[in-house]
Amino acid sequence: MKALFVTSEIAPWVKTGGLGDVAAALPPALHRIGCDVRLLLPRYPALRDAFPDAEHLVHLPWLGGQLPACDLYVAQHGELPFLLLDCPMLFDRPGNPYLGPEGRDWLDNHLRFGLLSRVAARLAGAATPLDWRPDILHCHDWQTGLAPYYLHHYETGGAASVLTIHNLAFQGVFPRALLEELGLTEDDWHIEGIEYYGHLSFLKAGLRHADWLTTVSPTYAREIQAAPEGMGMQGLLQTRAAQLTGILNGIDTEQWNPATDPHLAAPYDRERLDAKARNKRALQRELGLAERADCPLFGVVSRLTHQKGLDLAAAVGDALVHLPAQLAVLGSGEKTLEAAFRALAARHPGQVAVTIGFSEALAHRIEAGADIFLMPSRFEPCGLNQMYSLAYGTPPLVRATGGLADTVVNYSAAGLADGSANGFVCGDAMPAAILGTARWAAELWRDRAAWRRLQQNAMAGDYGWDGPARRYLDLYAKLSRSLRPA
């Protein structure tokens, strides 16, 4: 089975969210079980610098509209070939792959990711200039959403296409006036094509024309077929329900393993949980928190946004401290939330620590040093931090949405006994509900025997990529047989 995996970001070089982590972890997992997978992604400066010996593979001439000519380079990363799309006028830019220095979208994002989509479709079709052609074109989010459309309407003899929705909130919506710049015509402008409420939408085109759709958790696959999580696309997704599958993401269990994590003060595992307390003390010292063993430490590692429910966490911060409890926050995002957390820390020195920004090493230490991980997202397609927390024996407190509902089982005495309970689940996105659940978790934390069992339940789960990779490979095989018979 041959698969072309097309993505606009990949960790650790270019990452803004979970897509970068998936792009880094799923292809190697597919390779391990026998899939010939290659990645197509823009040759951003970070990737150009990471692979200075990349070899020129082929020149791709004009592909229509104002999409410029470009080149493909190939670089080997471990067992995987990276196909790097080189177009300096579009991709040779610093920083965030989608935003300019002032924090607003690049004005030519339609051309940047239109070119990525167009090249993906060409490589997946009969006219590919390569001597390797995929059975499956696997696209991700709006940045590659036009690829299935180009493949369906502008190429022949192509691969079967899969589009994975990582976050439906981002839809790649642009003015109709840009149609011709993308090499498209008025014939493409209709409700079954790329038209979306008077605009063109990359994501809508992919949702309509990909042979199969996946999301990153089973619950999110159901949620997006109705408002509000459907984000205006729910009607289309309802019509495609028979070709929509939720496959839960995994995590990199080598990078996120408390027994071998080099960032921690003390390694530990399910049978050596006493060592976790050393990581709490070390984290308290690092962040300037009082070294208290008599109250739980809540941890947050997140983008500080409304979607992530961090306004709810800020709203209950004062009451949380008086449970009593401590709070350690790492993240950045909306300026009002950054300011709210800074003010919370100023009101409670020694009890609340806030680090604005991101540090991979500190993220690992918070996962290990916290007693409870706070993740009150309003919606969460999959989520990774709750799985990191489970693997680190840090029971998460989450909202019942998306992948959080699929991975965290609410505490109950019966669930504790049968091994299923591994955290705390709150139904409502309201400060009172979050605080009530936090109070409940803090009370259970004081029952050392019950807490240890909850931690062991959490750490017993399988959160790796092998299972999800097999489900993707099964889907590839199904599509290859049914849609592209030999």
Image: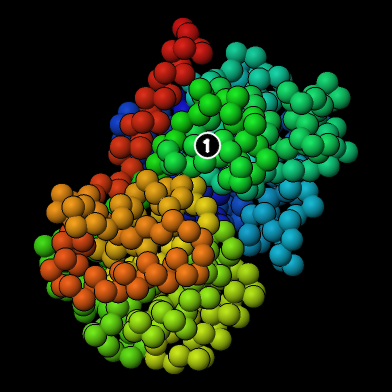
Measured along the vertical axis of the image, is residue 160 above or below residue 197? Answer: above
Q: Residue furthest top?
A: 486
Nearer to the camera, 421 or 253: 421
Measured along the vertical axis of the image, is residue 251 above or below residue 449? Answer: above
> Could you tell me if residue 264 is visible in this image?
no
Residue 224, picture quadrant: top right
Q: Residue at x 58, y 76 (%)?
A: 338
Q: Position of residue 146 (x, y in %)?
A: 68, 32
> Could you tell me if residue 18 is visible in this image?
yes
Under tag 1, what secondary structure? strand
Quadrant the N terminus occupies:
top left
Q: Position of residue 319 (x, y in %)?
A: 44, 81
Measured along the vertical axis of the image, is residue 100 above or below residue 319? Answer: above
- Amino acid type shown at disc 1: Thr
Residues packed near mark 1 inside 10 Å, few (<14), some (14 to 19) or many (20 plus): many
In this rendering, position of residue 255 left or right of residue 204 = left
Which residue lies under the disc numbered 1? 164
Q: Residue at x 16, y 61 (%)?
A: 453
Q: How is the image coloured?
A: rainbow
Residue 26, picture quadrant: top left
Nearer to the camera, 266 or 349: 349
Nearer to the camera, 61 or 293: 293
Q: Residue at x 15, y 72 (%)?
A: 448
Q: Position of residue 442 (x, y in %)?
A: 30, 74
Residue 144, picture quadrant: top right
Q: Position of residue 119 (x, y in %)?
A: 65, 32
Nearer to the camera, 352 or 376: 376
Q: Residue at x 59, y 74 (%)?
A: 337
In this rendering, position of residue 250 left or right of residue 46 = left
Measured along the vertical axis of the image, is residue 404 above or below residue 469? Answer: below
